[in-house]
């Protein structure tokens, strides 16, 4: 696309007697930035690239169980920030904040989409029983992109696992 755009731009500019010197790398960078941040969400293009727009705010309820085998209920708010090439997930509860370190998005035939991400969780000052820990979450997002079910587990620092239900409350298309 960048090479074609350069050729067309030079032809049109030449028609008006203007000399244009656009580097293909610069044009590629501009086109890539536009596509990565905006164009992939446009109707038609979004179906072509098959990447759903998950950006926004999600209400989360969860249950976790640890080595004590006692079920703990909690709730929080998740935020997904997304471009075509990157997805970042954060989750905040009364007791802690977590941020994804990496994430993978794939189509899950018959269910919608699946996001698998690794995260680091940091306790807030009010949560004395928590320590910094890492974990992994598998999020299965409905085909209409308004809800999700998840399972997660944490490392040896926390030794818990659990389930979550996500409900989208605000879509963010930037």
Image: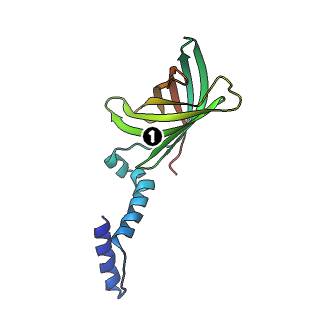
Q: Is residue 44 visible?
A: no
Residue occupying the point 36% across, 81% down: 20
Q: How is the image coloured?
A: rainbow
User: Which SS class for mark 1?
Assistant: strand
On the image, numbered disc 1 is attached to which residue? 102
Q: Residue 126, image x and y in percent?
A: 71, 28
Please tell me which residue lies in front, 111 or 71: 71
Residue occupying the point 60% across, 19% down: 73
Q: Quadrant of residue 170?
A: top right
Q: Quadrant of residue 2?
A: bottom left
Q: Residue furthest bottom?
A: 17
Q: Is residue 133 above or below residue 20?
A: above
Q: Is residue 124 above or below residue 67?
A: below
Q: Residue furthest front?
A: 156
Q: Is residue 136 visible?
A: yes
Q: Residue 43, image x and y in percent?
A: 39, 50
**How many numbered markers are drawn?**
1
Q: Quadrant of the N terminus?
A: bottom left
Q: Residue furthest top?
A: 69
Residue occupying the point 50% across, 35% down: 119
Mark 1: few/some/many CA within 10 Å (<14, 14-19, 20+): some
Q: Residue 81, image x and y in percent?
A: 51, 45
Q: Residue 163, image x and y in percent?
A: 50, 22
């Amino acid at each position: 696309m960048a090479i074609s755009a350069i050729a067309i731009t030079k032809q049109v500019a030449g028609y008006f007697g203007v000399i244009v010197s656009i580097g293909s790398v610069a044009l590629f960078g501009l086109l890539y930035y536009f596509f990565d941040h905006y164009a992939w969400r446009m109707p038609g293009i979004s179906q072509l690239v098959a990447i759903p727009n998950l950006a926004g705010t999600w209400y989360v309820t969860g249950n976790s169980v640890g080595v004590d085998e006692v079920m703990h209920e909690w709730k929080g708010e998740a935020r997904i920030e997304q471009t075509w090439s990157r997805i970042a997930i954060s989750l905040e509860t009364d007791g802690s904040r977590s941020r994804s370190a990496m994430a993978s998005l794939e189509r899950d035939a018959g269910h919608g989409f699946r996001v698998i991400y690794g995260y680091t969780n940091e306790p807030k000052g009010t949560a004395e029983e928590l320590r910094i820990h890492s974990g992994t979450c598998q999020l299965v997002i409905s085909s209409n992109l308004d809800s999700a079910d998840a399972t997660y587990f944490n490392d040896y620092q926390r030794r818990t696992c659990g389930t979550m239900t996500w409900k989208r409350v605000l879509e963010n298309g930037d």
